[in-house]
Each structure stands twice: as structure tokens, then as C-alpha cells.
Image: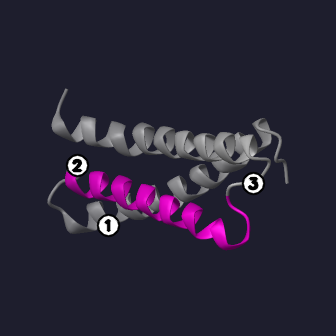
Amino acid sequence: MSKAVKLHLVAWLGVPLAFAGYVGLSYNLALSQRDLPFLGQREWRWWVAFLIALAVGGACIIAAETNRAKLRTAVLLIYLLCMSAALAGLHIAVACHLGDCI
């Protein structure tokens, strides 16, 4: 398996799995204390994790793509748009699964 394929696997599969794990763990810990993990002043934690996930995935995409700047930029923008929606959707799915449906 080539380096580019591995980097794409990390970006497209590893990042969402890690983010879903973070959200699930946060909910499990908070719910055990009869609280919600991302309310009020604790919301910044979600945004930090979200941005770190996008940054790690974006770095993998940039490292995996060819030297052609236009292609790399296009793939990166597509990745960021798709992954932003996917991570938000994963958060909603995990939260609903754990009883915090919006």
C-alpha cells in the first residue's frame, strides 16, 4: 500500500473514527455525572476537537497529493467541505444514540 493511500485512509476513515470516539467518550463521561459535555462554557472543547480533526485530515490530504498545486488545493477544499459535514453529522448521530437528540 502506497504512502498516499495510507494518508487518504487516515484522512477519510481515521479522522472521523477518532472524532466519533472523542464525542462518544465525552458524552459517556459527562452523562455518568448527569451532565452534557458541550454546553455553555464547555462548547469550546468541541470546536477545538473539530478543528484539530480537520487540520490533521487536511495535512494528510496535502501530504498525499501530487505536486500540482491546483489539484492539491481542489482536493483539500473538497475534503474540508465533506469532512466538516461528516463530523457534524457524526456528532449528532453519537449524541442521539446516547440520548441527547436535538
Residue at figure coordinates x 14%, y 60% from the top left: 67
Q: Secondary structure at mark 1?
A: helix
Residue at figure coordinates x 30%, y 53% from the top left: 61
Q: Between residues 62 and 29, which one lies in front from this camera angle?
A: 29
Going by the image, does 100 lie left or right of 42? Answer: right
> Where residue 16 sits in the image (x, y, percent)?
50, 43
Residue at numbered disc 1: 73
The image quadrant of residue 43 is bottom right
Residue at numbered disc 2: 64
Task: Kindly report the distance in space between the C-alpha atoms of the residues bearing marks 1 and 2.
Answer: 12 Å
Q: Mark 1, mark 2: which one is toward the viewer?
A: 2
Looking at the rendered structure, which numbered label has been put on residue 36?
3
Looking at the rendered structure, which numbered label has been put on residue 88?
none
Q: Which residues are magenta?
A: 38-63
Q: Is residue 47 magenta?
A: yes
> Where residue 75 sits in the image (x, y, percent)?
36, 57
Residue at figure coordinates x 79%, y 42% from the top left: 96
Task: Kindly report the distance in space between the C-alpha atoms of the residues bearing marks 1 and 3.
Answer: 37 Å
